[in-house]
Image (cartoon, helix red, strand yellow):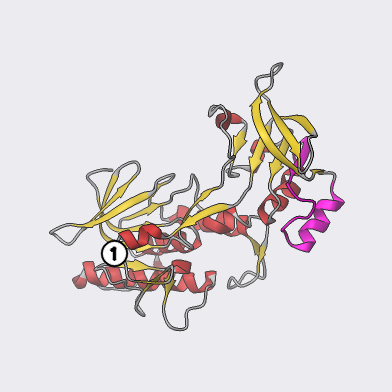
Amino acid sequence: MDNKLYDISIIGGGPAGMFAAYYASMRKLNVALIESLPNLGGQPQTLYAQKQIYDIAALPQVSGTELIDQLSKQMALLPCDEYLDTSVTDLQRADDDTWTISTNKETIKTKSIIIAMGNGAFQPRKLTFDYDPTIEENNLSYFVNDINDFKDKDVAIAGGGDSAVDWAIHINELANNTSIIHRRNKYRAMESSIDSLNESDVEQLNPFIIKDVTYNDDDKSKIDILLKKIKSEDEKTITVDKLLVNYGFISDSKILRDWNLELEGPFIKVSQQMETNLPNVFAIGDIATYPGKLQLIATAFAEGPTAVTKALRNIYPDKDYFEHSTSLFH
């Protein structure tokens, strides 16, 4: 794909970026969708997968995972090129007014850019000690790509926030045994979720921290997790097939300043047509700000088509047409 010139490249694969990519494909543009995480979904998928969302039009309620599943099905109707596990490091404008996007993997050339980075590029908080990196291949994960990976397994979830508690409850429905490890006796999750956790048979290992993770001596397909009790010398070891670490995420908007974007606090200032101060660079979703901005997914879903339409008019001024979606698949 190195020699391909895209019409629009979208940085950020959360709900705003996913719908903008679909809409741009609907307008018959060549689209690249760039996401720093290994999978699409952004915060709804990684931070509140099982939490219910109530402000999406036509859906009385929908969980983060269900919302992303539906957006993925929608995108499958008009696929675009997806660059996953790909972090953008720099933006450079060329003499022909196109943009070159440098990433940790390759270079992407594009006529316009839509930044849909949510609250900034974020990466998971990882375990603070060294461990055999091969453990991440089969036993240790920081994301849930497919919940069926935990089916009939002995599973430990580390963390005490909404995401960790939600996943403990959800994974417990299909796992053999499930434990949750938290450094405090109280969780930082919604009361209803804590009630569900307490009503389940999930083993609660509180207050413990993880001191080490190693392969099990007798069965190399399993791992041993060394736990230390807070304010105590007591230690214990549990053996599991899978460890899911949910310590939250680290967000960083510093890179936006390096791209010479005009900011207002941590947000990118945009016009009514979602334009930034850089030519043919737009911003939508939580990362964008303008007078009267509402930080809602519903708002982001409207901002995507606005940015795509303005980009289309800029890069193809003679092809500014609009086709109603009802005529697309006839």
Find residue 189 and report its image quarter: bottom right
Vertical relation: 80 (above or below) 114:
above
Q: Position of residue 202 (x, y in %)?
A: 81, 44
Q: Residue at position x 23%, y 56% from top?
A: 92
Residue 301 falls left or right of residue 96: right
Amino acid on which disc 1 is placed: Asn
Magenta stretch contains residue 329? no
Vertical relation: 216 (above or below) 302:
above
Q: Is residue 329 in view from this perspective?
A: no
Residue 125 falls left or right of residue 218: left
Helix, strand or loop status at disc 1: loop
Locate the N terminus and report the quarter of the image it occupies.
top left
Q: Residue at position x 72%, y 38% from top?
A: 156
Q: Is residue 6 in view from this perspective?
A: yes
- Magenta region: 173-200
**Residue at which label 1 appears:** 260
Q: Position of residue 245 (x, y in %)?
A: 63, 43
